[in-house]
Amino acid sequence: MMPAGASRKSGDDETDSSGTGVTGQEWQRLDRWLWIARAAKTRSFAAALIEAGKFRVNMVKVDKPAYRVKVGDIITSSVREHVAIWKVVAFGKCRGPASEARMLYEDLAPPPPPKSSVPAALRAVDVPSGLRAPGAGRPTKRERRQLDRLKDE
């Protein structure tokens, strides 16, 4: 409760009546939104990723953690080989469970291709027997014994 005569700062968060922790503000800092939406484990890690140029907002590269994100913005991240595309739906008041964090964005990334149960090294049809596909790594002890038996025949 606020004392009489005190006024709220314009940056204070107000939660909606649903109790989800979603605020009614117009914008939020990008590093804070990423942390609340559980895209980064800590806010400082989110800021470091932003400064490294791993995020775009509405196809514009962002390098400032204080970039103002608004509802409807499209955030694209490329960390390692993983590309994520999110549409900002709401802002959170504080970091909560993952179920609440998923309500802050809409995932626009296409689903990943299904993984085959057969390893890539075994799918290669044109590899002669006894030779390993490039990048398949060293043979295991069992594979080496099988190769030795094959060469002896």
Image (spheres, rainbow, N blue to C red):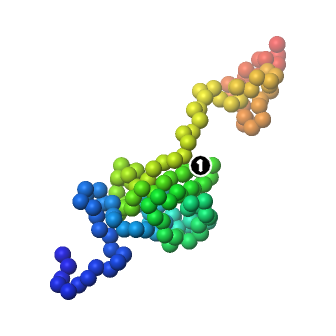
Residue 19, x across and y down, in percent: 25, 57
What is the residue that sits farthest to the bottom in this orientation?
A: 5
Q: Residue at x 30, y 60 (%)?
A: 21
Give above or below for 44 relative to 125: below
Number of marks drawn = 1
Seen in the picture, residue 84 relative to 138 is either above or below; the reply is below
Work out which quarter of the rendered image holds the C terminus and state it: top right
Q: Is residue 101 left or right of residue 78?
A: left
Residue occupying the point 28% across, 64% down = 15
Q: Dot 1 corresponds to which residue? A: 82
Q: Is residue 31 visible?
A: no
Quadrant of the image occupied by residue 147? top right
Q: Quadrant of residue 115?
A: top right
Tell me what residue is drawn at x 47 percent, y 58 percent. 72
In the figure, 145 relative to 91: above or below? above
Where does the N terminus fall, quadrant-wise? bottom left
Q: Give the side of residue 60 with respect to residue 133, left or right.
A: left
- The answer to which of 79 and 55 lies nearer the viewer is 55
Question: Residue 134 at x, y = what percent?
Answer: 78, 35
User: Is 47 or 8 nearer to us in this picture?
Assistant: 8
Whole-percent x and y of residue 36?
A: 41, 60
At horizontal 65% and vertical 29% (from top left) the residue drawn is 119
Q: Is residue 149 above or below residue 12?
A: above
**Residue situated in front as seen by the camera: 39 or 60:** 60
| Mark 1 surroundings: few (<14), some (14-19) or many (≥20) residues within 10 A | few
Q: Is residue 130 left or right of residue 37?
A: right
**Residue toward you, 125 or 19:** 19
Give the image location of residue 117, x and y in percent.
59, 27
Secondary structure under tag 1 reads strand
Horizontal arrangement in the rendering, residue 12 relative to residue 123 (left or right): left
Q: Identity of the amino acid at label 1?
A: His
Q: Would you say residue 109 is visible in this rendering? A: yes
